[in-house]
Amino acid sequence: MKRQSAKSAKIAWLSIVATLVVSLQVFVAGVTAREHSIAGNLPGQISPVAYTTSSYATSTSSTTTSTTQQIPSYWIATNLGNVLTYGGVPFYGSLAGRQLSSPVVGMAVTPDQKGYWLLQKNGQVTTFGDAHFYGSMIGKPLRHPAVAIEADPHTGGYWIVTAGGQVFSFNAPFYGSMPADKIPLPSPVTGFAPTPSGGGYWLTDSTGNIYTFGNAEFYGSAQSTGVSAQTPIVAIAPTPTGNGYWLATAGGQILNFGGAKSQGQFSTQLSAPVTSMTTTPGGNGYWVAMANGGIMNFGTAQYGGSAGGMLAPGAVAVSVVEGPGDGDPPTRLTYPSGSFGYDISWPQCGNPYPAKPYTIAIVGVTGGTANSQNPCLASEATWAGYAHENYINVNIPSSSNDLGDTNGPFGNCPQSSGNWYCEAANFGYAAAIQALSYAASSNASSPVWWLDVEVAGGFTSSWPGNGNGTWSTNQNINMEVIQGMLMAFKAEGVTPGIYSTYVQWPDIAGNYSPGGPLWVAGAYDSSWQNHCSSPYTYANGSPTLVQGTAGANNTVYDEDFAC
């Protein structure tokens, strides 16, 4: 079956020097400042251009207010102007391949979600889809760099905000801003969000102060509540009714205020800092983006994929924005539809590897069970080449020794404590991290990892298990192991998918539906395309690959096809 992936090389965090900051809460409605409403075409504006290449994008905070929602999904934007689509959200173009005058720093979606704007650091705005151009800061002096752009839900215009707290309105009402030349802020503004009614907006700075304008209410800040933001605040997202908001830190903390309810946060050290967050339309979930393109979903937000480990050199994910999707698989950077290839692992050690031609190449990192190692991983990764993907065997621990240290991101639950669910989740998380580390040491890292979920050693009611490759008769325990692995891969900024069948998955994991890419097993080469759709799907996922039965094409290898 399949084996693991992804680099475990962690990005070293820059040291953050603690500074004493005076808590500053500013309540301003209709403050008269030099900034004012600007409209019309200004010199140097880029006209809308539609590109057909996939891309990435960037933004500090983003929320949308569509009433035509299908399946809540998201776009990711990068500093290079790329726009990546996930979950079937439409692609309207990007700045990919353009010579940019300054990096992209923000993205905003039109109220009908049929277009978007990209904002550059120098205040330039570019439109895509049905987004209208109402002006930009080109030709206007900026005392501070632009950091965010947000749409007015009523006029269809937009606001631009700078690191100094100045707000510029374009076909949108102006409710005031920070005159930074008179009242210097304790730290740069990093987040901006309009109220759902469009009658005001919030600003946040990197130390977690909140500044309110118009009908935006103050519900607390990282300073006023005594909450310690361990790393800088990078984004703010309001609830759908405007009765509260969330703040996201670079280190993965999600702070909630007012009516905003916590849906979870990162519980381990991240491979890259958080840069942006966006909420589901109902406010019962959110997505959090990391600089390396990784995505973590919480609450009802469904995981549609990420760009973790796949961004172009120099690219940084700066914005994640919610939009209406149709459940299609995420933008794929490898294996075009119809591609053919193989997956190999420890059973092929010492034997010839598949001969070219092939496009798909997937390598098993483990040696048949979750905590084992494929002894010939390095040579198989060399066979697979640069664009290979990895897979990891998944099962419950076979013994107390296999279970190991049960403390982890899901809680401290020593062995024999009786907290099997906590132990199972921590086991899955630790096994994934171990596999990532082994892959990195074998020069076999990959941006895509598949979880091999199949019935290999049967089922047991014992905890830990009593044999290699077993599953528990308690499906909730199995679900926790799988969930722990998925969280580990997402936290490391790589894209996880699930290898299984529509028969075995419910036997093992019950109704657990984490979504994401699927590698569907059990097809013959003559019928593989049928397995790219119902009834062969499972886990609420999107079929991406199909595995043919070994020997179906007169080979001794598992054959794979791209949907």
Image (tube, rainbow, N blue to C red):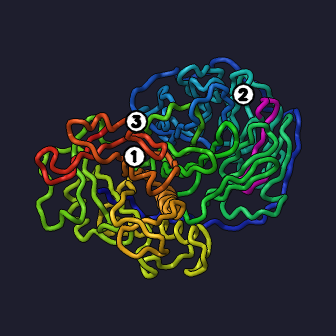
Q: Nearer the N terminus, badge 3 or badge 2?
A: 2
Residue count near mark 2 (Cα–Cα under 10 Å), binned few <14, some 14–19, many ≥20: many
Do labels 2 and 1 touch, CB within 8 Å?
Answer: no
Q: Residue 502 carries which label?
A: 1
Q: Looking at the image, which is closer to me, 346 or 181?
A: 346
Residue placed under numbered mark 2 in the picture = 152
Q: Looking at the image, which is closer to me, 484 or 129?
A: 484
User: Amino acid type of disc 3?
Assistant: Ser
Q: Label 3 to label 2, Cα distance in Å?
A: 40 Å
Residue 201 among those drawn in magenta: yes
Q: Label 1 to label 3, Cα distance in Å?
A: 9 Å
At a point 60% along the width and 64% down the height, the residue shown is 267
Residue placed under numbered mark 3 in the picture = 534
Residue 532 percent coordinates (x, y): 35, 37
- Split into 4 quadrants, where in the image is the N terminus? bottom left
Span highlighted in magenta in the image: 196-209
Name the front one of labels 2 and 1: 1
Do labels 3 and 2 touch, CB within 8 Å?
Answer: no
Residue count near mark 1 (Cα–Cα under 10 Å), binned few <14, some 14–19, many ≥20: some
At a point 17% along the width and 53% down the height, the residue shown is 557
User: Amino acid type of disc 1?
Assistant: Tyr
